Image (spheres, coloured by chain):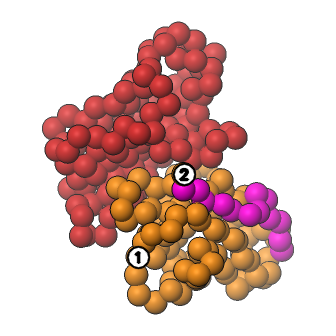
Chain colours: A orange, B red
Amino acid sequence: AQSVSQHNHHVILSEAASLELGCNYSYGGTVNLFWYVQYPGQHLQLLLKYFSGDPLVKGIKGFEAEFIKSKFSFNLRKPSVQWSDTAEYFCAVRPQAAGNKLTFGGGTRVLVKP
Amino acid sequence: GAGVSQSPSNKVTEKGKDVELRCDPISGHTALYWYRQSLGQGLEFLIYFQGNSAPDKSGLPSDRFSAERTGGSVSTLTIQRTQQEDSAVYLCASSPPKGKGETQYFGPGTRLLVL
């Protein structure tokens, strides 16, 4: 069965530090890739997505992610985090040949210290 | 415009009771999804409706779980004879018709606690 792995469960960093969250998936076919964010007390929101084209995608709030097909990875980055980036981040994969359901990673809780 | 709405926002029930959770998708979205978010299990797919097609029920954990979507809009997720392990946040999402983005937009969830 396909799976999505997020390597870090918890990340703690200071404001202005750079952030990189890893995401790897196991499906071998064509996939759509997503990063969602859940701020404390709020619902899941889309940060960015990759369907095709330029493998470096830019999302909201200064986030970007790079799709590396050979590594089955879709890592999320932000050069300089803010306290307001404290949230839980979820990577999700949708194989194009397997219907529309998303398979999510386990999530990474990010705490940004002011 | 209005996003996905879910009701109730919180539900406390006793073991063995039935519960119904409601989802109102974004107007014009043809696809509707239910997921479950629980400690230790992360976010799990439950069921997916697309237009008038037969739903994809492959994620339902047992026959105590069922869902329906009336008139291609509102959906109800029913859990019969609830168990403590059903305690979780139940999330609904909807997405536009194929070819128009297909990004899933999530509602705020219903937090279910089974005592």
The kind of residue on which mark 2 rests is Ala
- Identify residue for label 2: A1
Instruction: Check the image and name the residue furthest to the bottom.
Output: A54
* Whether residue A10 can be seen here: yes
Query: Foreground: A70 or A81?
Result: A70
Q: Residue at x 68, y 39 (%)?
A: B39
Tell me, for residue A51, which label it has, or none. 1
Query: Residue B10: x and y, percent?
Result: 52, 30
Q: Position of residue A94 (x, y in %)?
A: 44, 62
Magenta highlight range: A2-14
* Residue drawn at point x = 46 percent, y = 89 percent: A54
Residue B80 % position (x, y)? 44, 16
Q: In the rendered view, does B37 fall on the left or right side of A11?
A: left
- Asked if the magenta segment contains residue A7, the reply would be yes
> Marks 2/1: CA distance?
21 Å
Whether the magenta-drawn stretch holds residue A3 is answered as yes
Q: Amino acid at mark 1?
A: Phe
Query: In the rendered image, is residue B27 in sight?
Result: no
Q: Residue at x 66, y 56 (%)?
A: A107
Q: Residues within 10 Å of mark 1 (few under 14, many from 20)?
A: some
Dot label at residue B53: none
Helix, strand or loop under label 1: loop
